Amino acid sequence: MDGELISVGTEILLGNITNTNAAFLSEMCARLGISLYYQTVVGDNEKRLKEVVKQACDRSQVVIITGGLGPTEDDITKEVTASVLGYKLVEDAHTKKRIEGFFKKYIKNQGNKKITENNWKQAMVPKGAIVLDNQNGTAPGLIMEQGDKKVILLPGPPGEMQPMFMESVYPYLHKSQPEVIYSQMVKICGIGESQVDDEIKDLLRKQKNPTIAPYAKIGEVHLRVTAKAKDEKEAKKMCKPIVRELKARFGKNIYTTEEDKTLEESVVELLSDQGLTLATAESCTGGMLSARIVNVPGASKILKEGFVTYTDRAKRKRLLVKKGTLAKEGAVSAKTAKEMAKGGCFTSGADVCVSITGIAGPEGGSKEKPVGTVFMACCYQGDVNVKEYHFSGSRNKIREYVTVSALILLRDTILQNFKRK
Amino acid sequence: MDGELISVGTEILLGNITNTNAAFLSEMCARLGISLYYQTVVGDNEKRLKEVVKQACDRSQVVIITGGLGPTEDDITKEVTASVLGYKLVEDAHTKKRIEGFFKKYIKNQGNKKITENNWKQAMVPKGAIVLDNQNGTAPGLIMEQGDKKVILLPGPPGEMQPMFMESVYPYLHKSQPEVIYSQMVKICGIGESQVDDEIKDLLRKQKNPTIAPYAKIGEVHLRVTAKAKDEKEAKKMCKPIVRELKARFGKNIYTTEEDKTLEESVVELLSDQGLTLATAESCTGGMLSARIVNVPGASKILKEGFVTYTDRAKRKRLLVKKGTLAKEGAVSAKTAKEMAKGGCFTSGADVCVSITGIAGPEGGSKEKPVGTVFMACCYQGDVNVKEYHFSGSRNKIREYVTVSALILLRDTILQNFKRK
């Protein structure tokens, strides 16, 4: 099937918000095996919206439209789409009841929202459309089928759209596909995007079914292997040798093959499996590393504590970095990083401590240590592994890359000391 | 003038990357007074790209196209656009020289990049087009003028596109506008989006010139006041009474009227102006607050240190929270927050300490303290201000809101104790 997306909203055209809905839906369509050829953004303007919807319905089999389903007069997506496709709007008793229930619950919790006459506009649906319940808001989702064409309307707020898509639309489209799509994720860390591309150039060149799609993230590369077949068993079987080949090529750099597992989750799991506790000692990242560890629910089991020692004084006081080291080698040096990691273990009693000290810029660089110079160390039960890095980009970009690199250094250190239990 | 954007790239259609270029360019167009009616994303496919470019050039005065200017065969944006508009491609000696220089510099720094035959494709430009130098890559930007229409091609990577836009395209479009556009930013914190909307409903309703555009950020609302006039002096004069009115309505909730100043910057400045030092004591945010403070270059002047005390043990050891408090009131309580803030000041020697303890979920909630319950305290030279909050959303959303709220609590505390120097 081929498809396209339409995002409706003047706030996107004004740049007030980034169109993250389009990125989410595009990835989902790729996963479903729908070839997406266009994304369009248009404002809440009847003439232009009509023209865009008409064009999309003429040229694509699946049209997903988000936004403009709110209760105000400006919200005209449903009305315009129904008119383009020749549907009449009728009140849907089930939706009306659901909206009433939603407000009752909301008023009980927050006490400051009234049902206005406007809201009943959201209970009007195109006659014959499939109505999708919204668990997180009032606007229902709608699917209109015309022959083999499907036009799908979804609310704009990501907190409403995403759960509705996953619960109702994903299974619906999955079932509509003439073939079954199965995809398997392979997440890689510690190798750059161009190197990953290089190492699978031969696979990418001859790919057809299954396909391999690389997704570059900060410090990570995700490869999605997708197969189309007549049933899931067959599709899974087709993915298997590719995933096996990727595992052979990237080995320990693959940190997970689970769809939703993050790098920090896999690191917390590694520590927890080995019964190890962690401390962090950060300078230029200022807490970004510990914050990522705490992203993982239940991280308290392994994270003893985090030190943000941005000043020399704090490095000395909390992490026992020697005065002489700071004076002779400087705060940004291999020796300081080493002492920070050792001191972090000692003072917190953690088994492992990762330390970070560097120059994130824009000021503070020198000829010997330009902006982007970062030293990290990982102390594991007394042994310290120190590394020097050179990053480029803005202050924030550098700090994000540093944080991922620290997670990777931590992961490498544990893997090197891996004990089978 | 009216305009539209076209983003070219299969990686956007696959959801591999979020289209942040569109958000950036939309905001810039709004600032320039260009009415943007459409954004389109299309892949590197000749037929579809041709159709999209043709449609855009037919209906809009300014068409900005990003992406697809790379050296490979897949990159066809320049070729397709030139053919649609009837331009011939010729080699540009200046660009060729610039590309040579770029590679020489790159090879010196990184040592792993060769000029391939492909690269000279990027020195070909539509005959008669304005060529824009790329300081951060090889592909030049291009402007083609046809009567009062302007078609602008820019490279896709944001690190190349944004500086090129700001240096060359922004002033070019600014000059092309028949009227002068002037805009003034007003950044508000501590009041929700709907309340801000409510308080300026009358201004929004009667706005015409100047206009007020609200941009909702996490925990903040930015209002952009934009006026069109025959010269800048006149436009500035028109904005003034509106900004004055906004200042009267929102008072101390306005933290800046500077375009690029962030909330954390304004807080660091406040502390620094008062000669105060800061410590942070975080539980559920795990370092997100200190990381935001360290976003500000030079934060080391005011940030003494940050404590990430996710465990009870760390709260006791580092922040001297009493065993009895943790046992009787629990780690998530007003009393624990208070002791954390006091202890943070005491142990670090900082003048001010903000503490955060809460339940970010998804586990750990109870009937009395559901997920989203957060206590924060701010200790200012011995006095402690404690507050209870209730947030909703995912673990990460909650933690982001908590972090902004902590910055706001810190700001409020300093403002209450403000001393004129």
Image (tube, coloured by chain):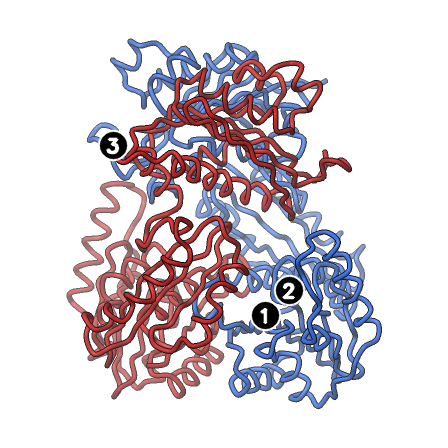
Chain colours: A blue, B red
Amino acid type shown at disc 2? Cys
| Depth check, front residue: B232 or B64 | B232
Amino acid type shown at disc 1? Leu
Q: Position of residue A175 (x, y in %)?
A: 79, 67
Determine which residue is flagged by label 2. A29
> In the rendered view of the protein, which quadrant contains the N terminus of chain A?
bottom right
Mark number displayed over residue A364? 3
Structural distance between the alpha carbons of marks 2 and 3? 46 Å
* In contact (CB < 8 Å): disc 1 and disc 2: yes
Disc 1 is placed on an element classified as strand
Q: Residues within 10 Å of mark 2 (few under 14, many from 20)?
A: many
Structural distance between the alpha carbons of marks 1 and 2? 7 Å
| Depth check, front residue: B290 or B183 | B183
The quarter of the picture where residue A313 lies is top left
Determine which residue is flagged by label 1. A36
Q: Residues within 10 Å of mark 1 (few under 14, many from 20)?
A: many
Query: How many numbered discs, if any?
Result: 3
* In contact (CB < 8 Å): disc 2 and disc 3: no
